[in-house]
Each structure stands twice: as structure tokens, then as C-alpha cells.
Image (tube, helix red, strand yellow):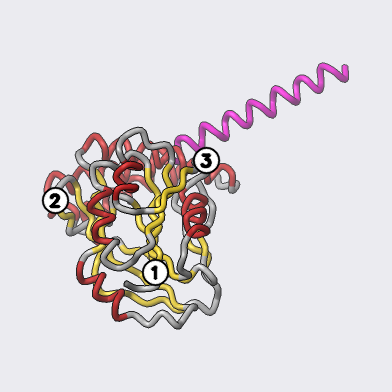
Amino acid sequence: MVPVSVIIITKNEAEIISRTIAMARLITDDIVVIDNGSNDDTVEIAATNNCRIFKADWHGYGANKNKGIAHARYKWILSIDADEIIDKDLIHSLFRLDYSKENVVYDIRFKTYFGSKLIRFGSWGRDHHIRLFNRETVKWTELPVHETLVLPRSTVKKTLPGHIHHYSVRDEYECREKAIYYASLSAKKYYNSGKKSNYIKLYLAPAFNFIRNYFLYLGFLDGVEGWHIAKNSAKNTWLKYHYLENLECTDTKRHYVKHRLLLNWTE
């Protein structure tokens, strides 16, 4: 075993979580599952596989990952989702790693799947994330979506050999639904941070997103799956700025109503 705690956040992942846990169990005796109200067999499967399970209200991906880190036995954290499975090459890398350098974080390459098909091109074919770090120096931002790690200036980033296999979506329907769901979360994040929608972001950004994924990154070589990914990625870009524009309009109307009420009261 290595001195690493594996943190998994879950909701209704019974279909795959046993495979995720089985590979994580090859490197550690500490697997922490933060569950957000699963109503399938996710929690039962995790308990059967000797995970430590904590139920938490949903406050965003970053916040729930930080809750898991707080429960970890070890300082080193491998953060994965329930639909992400570490492979044998990565396991070998983890056993050879020097864990004495707390200022180092490790970037891990992903192999991402559409159903059972490995996606080799487009943005999915280039995917990689920092997922191994020391909790004494690093933590997640507590954003509702697209959480990132807060890295000190002294941080050194290295890439680990091996991959995390991400079983992202089962079919085109789930791909589309995820695009819509994450667009809504992104719009709220942008709105809360003061970011504004405009013509370029609404219309040019989605077009460029599609061209980059499908043509520049050769997404068309992934066949119909590459088409669905590029199309729904562009849809996500348009929707998040469309939703942001709606939030801005609602806010403007609210301020107008308050202004008119104030004027009426003072007349």
C-alpha cells in the first residue's frame, strides 16, 4: 500500500463504482466516499467494499471534495470521480513515487470513453488533470462547477505515467443532458463572479468551440461520437452564456421594479 487516501464523490453510481473501488483498493487501505443522496445501490456497494462513507448535502464539487479530504487518513490525496478508474500503469507509478516532497502535484492523463468507445481525438482525447497532491499545501476551490486546485507559487507540477479511464457518458442523450446541466452551473458561477454575456460569447465562442473540437483537434476521426461531442460542447458554450444573459435580464428587471417602488413611495 502507498500513503495515499482516495477520495470519491458519488451520486447514483452503482453501475460502475465497484470497478472504481477495486482498482483503488490495489494502492490504499483508505477510500473515502462522499455521497450526495444516492437512491440506488451506490452506498451499499461502497460499504461492502470497506470504504468509509460520509453523506453530505450538495454544496458544489469543490466543497464536497474538500469534505472528503478532511476525512482522509493520509496527507496525500488521489481525487477521482466514481466513473473514473485508475489503470495498472498508474498504479505502478504510484508505488514508485517519492512522497517526501509536499510541494509537488501530479498531473494525470485521461482516457475518456463515449459508451464503450475510447475517444482519441477532440478535446476529450487531450484531457488531463492534477489529481494527486498533498492536502497540507493544496485544496480545491469551492465553486459549484469546474473546480480547480489552489496552488502555492512554490508548487512543482509533474506528469505521472499511466492513465485514469473516464467513462464519461453512456450515449448521446446523456452527453446532451450533461451539456445542459453544466451550462446551468457555469452560468450561475459566472453571474456570481460578475462575468457578463455578450455577442461574441453567445455566437462566436460556440462556433469556434465546434471548429476547434471537430476540425482542429481532429474530432471527426472519432466518427459519430466525435460529432456528438463537438456538437454538445458547442451547445454547452452557447447555453451557459444564454443562461447568464437571462440571469442578467432578471437582475435588471428586479432592480427596475425596486427603483419604481422606491419612486412611488417617495412621491
Rounded to the nearest angstrom, the CA distance separating label 2 from label 3 is 32 Å
Q: Which residues are magenta?
A: 240-267
The number of numbered badges drawn on the structure is 3
Quadrant for the N terminus, please.
bottom left
What residue is pinned by disc 2? 117
* Residue 83, image x, y percentages: 28, 50
Nearer mark to the viewer, of 2 and 1: 1
What residue is pinned by disc 3? 188
Rounded to the nearest angstrom, the CA distance separating label 2 from label 1 is 30 Å
Residue flagged by tag 2: what amino acid is it?
Answer: Lys
Q: Residues within 10 Å of mark 2 (few under 14, many from 20)?
A: few
Above-or-below relation of 16 to 41: below
Closer to the N terminus: mark 2 or mark 3?
2
Disc 2 element: strand
Residue 4: image tag: 1
Residue flagged by tag 3: what amino acid is it?
Answer: Lys
